[in-house]
């Protein structure tokens, strides 16, 4: 018989190593120590090429993907999270992952566990990648095990898990579940729900949980009351927050400074200043007087709400309390005054800061300079710029842009140009906003040579001139009185080769909108004769212009050119061409064009959608039902045009009768949506279109029965060749 020490024990984790698997960790020595997870998809670091080679900084490529996986392993996240679980918790979570749904196979694996503890259930429920349906089933399954009972941590983890997958309504029922299972909820469970809803800005849900607290007889602490009121105020439910504050006082609790400030900020946002000062008085009596941070918060909210009167009252209240405003308070108030065009009062506060020797922020200077320029007081703005530089600051680009615009508005273009040169010297990277006022001033004063010099200088600074010129012309044509000036500038710059197709498009569209259609068509012919190639925007503008002058055939040619480019016309071009086709009686091509527009454009015109609806309803051959569609269209603010009436003609000729179409036109005439002349025109179009449809049907019948060739053989000239 061998000695006792030589007895071979059955392999077991207590006695040493065992073969590791994906689901069973390797245990070295004692009880569950030195656990290691074996991931079969993870490469061995000993065999990886990066481990054997030494890293050399000189050969490192920062743009390369060395050491990074091209495709992320889908199980990598699971195994990284599984390392935080205990072995049994990992076994349960891996069973969930393997079966993917609750059923007998999964229950059979769970039944292999000898004992389930609340700590284990909490651990599993906290895992972020579990299906909420499976986690709910597991929670209820664990509650049915012999000798097991959920503790508070289990319920909390269950509520967190439901909220994590946006099932917050189910999470709100956890207190009822606890009560049913003989575990009355404490304040902590309600605090968790309130915190979750507050973080998600669900104010009404916060109040719902608060009402539920009262039903369970749980009284919140001051901290939780503050959280409830804060969530309600942030979600604009101030009246509910005030009702909660009434309950707060009924419970005999003492307010903290946070309690007062939550309510005061909500009242400031709504401009209820009488209640604000009432709460401030109560705060002084019961606690302490507000500090500078509290007053600054009130000023910031009132400035954001543009409540200047309330802001002034709060500032006076702060002075009465002998609270000295700091730099942040001054900065908040001055910036707000400048935004609401009260720069004079802001400047008085600025001088007050200077007397107190406060360090004035550059943002204050910038706000005052911008406001003075907007009011036309460029001299005061320049004085502030000098004061800014004397204080040791360097003006930023926004300040220079504001001053340049102010000089240009005051017709001091040369000074504006000098400021532009200063921005270049100080390497502030001037942009289009910097040079735009100068270009506009040069254009209005007909100083074309100066425009070219400025453009040449911008080219030397490596700016994209064509993009900036496009922005310049867009800005120029925004006002009708500057369109002709923009055209003169373009004629001059064209000789200097400062032009392009986008500029042609901008001017064509502006001339068309201004009623100068012939000049727009002149630009089109000029563009065609040049070395530039018109694009889809050019032809879209041309479609509108040709329809305006009555040349629908040429408009159709431009539409076909866009289609040959495999591009899509603009919605305005579609609308214009449809109206032009309807005007000359080409109803079928117009309806095809409407379908083409809705098939290609992401968000087509709503009137086109109504037109297709009208054609569809015409299948019922009932004028009253078509009239209901027109009534809905009128209610939406769209008045019927010739395309809508042509849609009625098309639909009734194809699916209905002439009588029903005439009934609808007569109804529209009675409602004064049609004139007598329009009624006559549409009636003639209805008869002509019905004749065309009838002729098409006859011709189709002749072709179907093979009679077309016989009629032609007998000398018939009625059929098309």
Image (cartoon, rainbow, N blue to C red):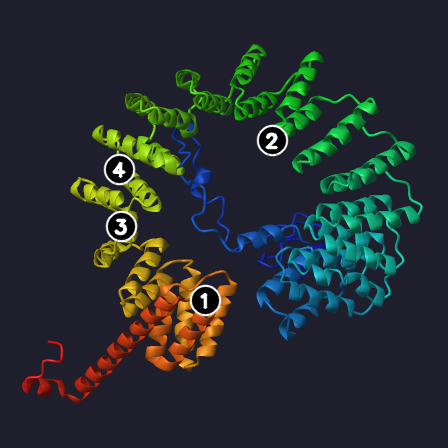
- Please give the residue where the numbered disc 3 appears in the rendered image: 542
Say which residue appears at 85% left-offset and 38% top-offset.
279
Mark 4 vs mark 2: give the one in front.
2
Q: In the rendered view, does 718 fall on the left or right side of 687?
A: left
Mark number for residue 672?
A: 1
Residue 554 in percent (x, y) is at 21, 56
Q: Are marks 2 and 3 in contact (CB under 8 Å)?
A: no
Whether residue 417 appears in this view of the structure is yes
- Mark 3, residues whose alpha carbon is within 10 Å: few (<14), some, or many (≥20)? many
- Nearer the N terminus, badge 1 or badge 4? 4
Rounded to the nearest angstrom, the CA distance separating label 3 from label 4 is 17 Å
Q: In the rendered view, does 385 fall on the left or right side of 717?
A: right
- Mark 1, residues whose alpha carbon is within 10 Å: few (<14), some, or many (≥20)? few
- Nearer the N terminus, badge 2 or badge 3? 2
Q: Give the quarter of the figure containing the N terminus.
A: bottom right
- Nearer the N terminus, badge 2 or badge 1? 2
Q: How many marks?
A: 4
- Nearer the N terminus, badge 4 or badge 2? 2
- Mark 2, residues whose alpha carbon is within 10 Å: few (<14), some, or many (≥20)? some
Mark number for residue 339?
A: 2
- Please give the residue where the numbered disc 4 appears in the rendered image: 500
Q: In the rendered view, does 493 fall on the left or right side of 201?
A: left
Q: Identify whether 330 is placed above or below 649.
A: above
Rounded to the nearest angstrom, the CA distance separating label 1 from label 4 is 48 Å
Secondary element under disc 3, as helix, strand or loop, is helix
Q: Identify whether 613 is placed above or below 425.
A: below
Rounded to the nearest angstrom, the CA distance separating label 2 from label 1 is 49 Å
């Amino acid at each position: 018989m061998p000695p006792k020490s030589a007895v071979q024990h059955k392999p077991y984790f207590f006695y040493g190593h065992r073969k590791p698997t994906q689901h069973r960790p390797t245990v070295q020595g004692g009880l569950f120590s030195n656990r290691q997870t074996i991931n079969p998809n993870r490469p061995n670091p000993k065999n990886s090429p990066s481990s054997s080679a030494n890293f050399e900084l000189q050969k490192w490529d920062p743009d390369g993907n060395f050491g990074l996986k091209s495709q992320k392993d889908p199980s990598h996240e699971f195994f990284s999270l599984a390392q935080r679980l205990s072995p049994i918790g990992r076994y349960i979570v891996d069973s969930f992952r393997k079966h993917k749904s609750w059923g007998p196979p999964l229950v059979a694996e769970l039944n292999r566990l000898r004992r389930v503890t609340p700590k284990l259930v909490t651990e599993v429920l906290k895992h972020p990648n579990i299906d909420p349906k499976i986690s709910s089933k597991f929670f209820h399954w664990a509650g049915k095990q012999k000798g097991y009972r959920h503790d508070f941590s289990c319920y909390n983890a269950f509520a967190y898990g439901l909220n994590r997958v946006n099932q917050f309504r189910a999470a709100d029922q956890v207190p009822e579940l606890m009560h049913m299972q003989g575990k009355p909820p404490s304040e902590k469970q309600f605090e968790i729900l309130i915190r979750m809803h507050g973080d998600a800005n669900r104010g009404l849900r916060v109040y719902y949980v608060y009402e539920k607290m009262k039903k369970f007889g749980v009284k919140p602490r001051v901290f939780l009351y503050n959280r409830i009121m804060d969530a309600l105020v942030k979600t604009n439910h101030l009246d509910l927050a005030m009702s909660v504050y009434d309950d707060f006082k009924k419970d005999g609790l003492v307010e903290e400074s946070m309690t007062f400030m939550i309510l005061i900020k909500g009242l400031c946002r709504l401009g209820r200043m009488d209640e604000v000062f009432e709460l401030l008085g109560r705060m002084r009596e019961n606690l302490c007087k507000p500090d500078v941070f509290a007053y600054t918060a009130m000023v910031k909210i009132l400035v954001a709400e543009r409540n200047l009167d309330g802001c002034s009252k709060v500032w006076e209240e702060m002075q009465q309390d002998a609270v000295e405003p700091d730099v942040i308070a001054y900065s908040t108030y001055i910036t707000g005054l400048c935004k609401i065009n009260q720069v004079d009062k802001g400047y008085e506060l600025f001088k007050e800061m200077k007397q107190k020797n406060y360090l004035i922020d550059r943002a204050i200077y910038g706000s005052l300079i911008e406001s003075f320029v907007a009011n036309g007081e460029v001299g005061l703005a320049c004085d502030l710029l000098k004061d800014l530089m004397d204080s040791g600051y360097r003006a930023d680009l926004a300040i220079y842009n504001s001053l340049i615009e102010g000089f240009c508005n005051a017709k001091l273009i040369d000074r504006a140009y000098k400021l532009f040169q200063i921005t270049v010297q100080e390497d502030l990277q001037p942009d289009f906003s910097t040079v735009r006022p100068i270009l506009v001033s040069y254009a209005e004063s007909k100083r074309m040579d100066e425009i070219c010099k400025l453009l040449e200088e911008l080219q030397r600074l490596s700016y994209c001139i064509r993009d900036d010129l496009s922005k310049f012309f867009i800005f120029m044509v925004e006002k009708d009185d500057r369109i002709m000036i923009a055209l003169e500038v373009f004629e001059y710059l064209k000789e200097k080769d400062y032009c392009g197709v986008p500029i042609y498009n901008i001017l064509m569209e502006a001339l068309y909108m201004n009623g100068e259609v012939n000049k727009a068509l002149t630009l089109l012919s000029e563009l065609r004769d040049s070395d530039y190639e018109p694009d889809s925007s050019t032809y879209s503008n041309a479609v509108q212009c040709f329809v305006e002058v009555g040349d629908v055939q040429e408009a159709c040619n431009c539409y076909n050119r866009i289609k040959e480019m495999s591009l899509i016309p603009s919605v305005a071009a579609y609308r214009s061409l449809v109206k032009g086709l309807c005007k000359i009686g080409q109803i079928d091509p117009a309806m095809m064009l409407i379908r083409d527009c809705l098939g290609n454009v992401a968000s087509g015109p709503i009137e086109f959608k109504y037109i297709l609806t009208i054609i569809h309803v015409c299948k019922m051959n009932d004028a009253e039902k078509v009239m209901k569609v027109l009534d809905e269209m009128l209610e939406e603010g769209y008045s019927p045009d010739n395309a809508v009436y042509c849609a009625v003609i098309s639909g009734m000729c194809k699916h209905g009768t002439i009588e029903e179409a005439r009934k609808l036109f007569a109804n529209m005439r009675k409602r004064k949506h049609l004139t007598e002349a329009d009624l006559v025109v549409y009636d003639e179009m209805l008869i002509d279109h019905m004749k065309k449809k009838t002729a098409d049907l006859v011709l189709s019948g002749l072709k179907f029965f093979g009679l077309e060739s016989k009629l032609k053989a007998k000398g018939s000239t009625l059929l098309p060749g």
